[in-house]
Image: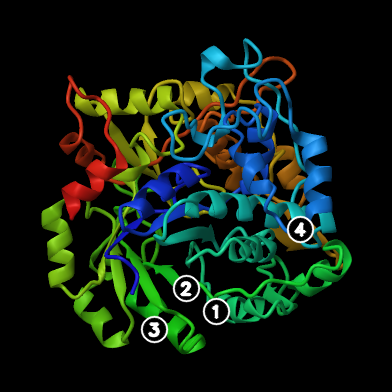
Amino acid sequence: MLPRLIQGGMGVGVSSWTLAREVALHGQLGVVSGTALDTILIRRLACGDLGGHMRRAISAFPFRAFSQRFLQRYFRTGLDTYGETATPIGTEHDHRNGVPPPSESLDSARPRHPLLPLPRTKLTRDRALLLMLANFVEVRLAKAGHDGVVGINYLHKIQLPILPSLYGAMLAGVDAVLIGAGIPGDIPETLDRFVEHRPASLTLELLDAGAERRELSFDPGALWSEEASGRRPPPMQRPEFLAIVSSVTLSRALLKKAPGGIDGLVVERSTAGGHNAPPRGPMQLSREGEPIYGPRDEVNPADLTPLGVPFWLAGGYATRKQFHAAVAAGARGVQIGTAFAFCNESGLDPPLRAKCLDAVLRNDAHVFTDPAASPTRFPFKVVELPETLSTEEVYDGRPRVCDLGYLRRAYLKPDGTIGYRCPAEPVDDYVRKDGDAADTVGRKCLCNALLANIGLAQRRADGYEEPPLLTAGDDLDCLRQFISADHPTYSARDVIEAIL
């Protein structure tokens, strides 16, 4: 059985290996975010990999020829030498994300980071290997030095990288896979096939395609034949699979589609941070402009118990009283996001985290459920903070650019080929790809903003630096139980002890 407390897999790198490892060390399910790990890895290396953690994990990756090529291309030397001054995991000198503090930066300004080719339906062999490597590294570091359990979280909406990412995480021995933001009924069979190193495929969500279907495929066995220099695939365990859902109806549909393949459910309320499921029925907005959720969007735990699988409740359960109420209602436990997102071990850039915690202490922290911010069209929780994309001034001053592309959607062109578009890209580009200009209004580039949240913002040639955009649950004030004017920071252990 998985633990009663699940640490949410948040953002891009907020649920970093350092946070997941700390939570697992204390007997709970530590979860790393699987979003954009390939970009995170090359940016950590470009910043010098202080502590040598990335290179230590990379050295264990079984596809060694690729690892060497990758390091030669992306690692920027100058801070330390792996094997000589690399810091052991778990010491007081760990640096989240492998990024040096400002006083130890290689340059006076943050570097311009290298960019990967935008994701496509047919990944090159090297891009597939990089996705495997990045997920392997994050999970391996999170699992180092303890026998606790570690999971990884993916968004089903981000389909293009998911197959090699899953396989890479499984190579590192991930204990649980959690997937939401979509209908992940195809994942259990994929896990079963990857345990045996067999090929797997997913149905591509293709816009403007009518009844036509295309698939995403990945064959790990072929990579072992071509890239592993005669090494045989290792035995692998099948991780537990937890589907992240927001309704009993979806839960039933998933269990019917994949009988026996879903080991549990994480049931998120609309109060949870990050992406929320849209309200059921026609979208209606409050006077403040937020989606209105009603009784049809509430989940009664009593309706989940007969489904026969354990479930965890999420979205506003960050106190001991709420935890016990959830267990009393039949839940195995709870998933906590916001409280872990702002603790010392999370991947958030320390100055940004301090700014938000200070706003909480001053009773000046507000969360807005923005119906337009996310290119996914899902409502997205935004913390309203100065100097972030939450302000009109910063949003209007940002040049529209799409150079990461994780949230691009594939669409079928009239000639039968596949194109890609994102409503947060330049408006003219989106319209040229048969997108509706009205759909671009208010859309924010989450890819770049969420990387800025963890101190890995892109700096443009003209000196412009991508601004951050914080997200949190409606219960942001839950952080008050951990901080005070005299003690403005707190640890993951503080969260666990407060709840359990």
Residue 23 position in % (x across, y down)? 35, 50
Quick check: marks 4 and 3 in contact, CB under 8 Å?
Answer: no
Residue 162 left/right relative to 7: right
Residue 252 position in % (x across, y down)? 39, 83
Q: Which residue is mark 4?
A: 128
Quick check: marks 1 and 2 in contact, CB under 8 Å?
Answer: yes
Classify mark 4: helix, strand or loop: helix
Q: Quadrant of residue 236?
A: bottom right
Work out how far the residue at label 3 is from the one at label 2, CA to CA, in angstroms: 15 Å
Q: Which residue is at 77% across, 51% downward?
A: 433
Please state which amino acid type lies under the numbered disc 2: Phe
Q: Which residue is at 24% across, 49% downward?
A: 496
Please state which amino acid type lies under the numbered disc 3: Arg
Work out how far the residue at label 1 is from the one at label 2, CA to CA, in angstroms: 7 Å
Q: Nearer the viewer, residue 96 or 441?
A: 96
Q: Which residue is mark 3?
A: 252
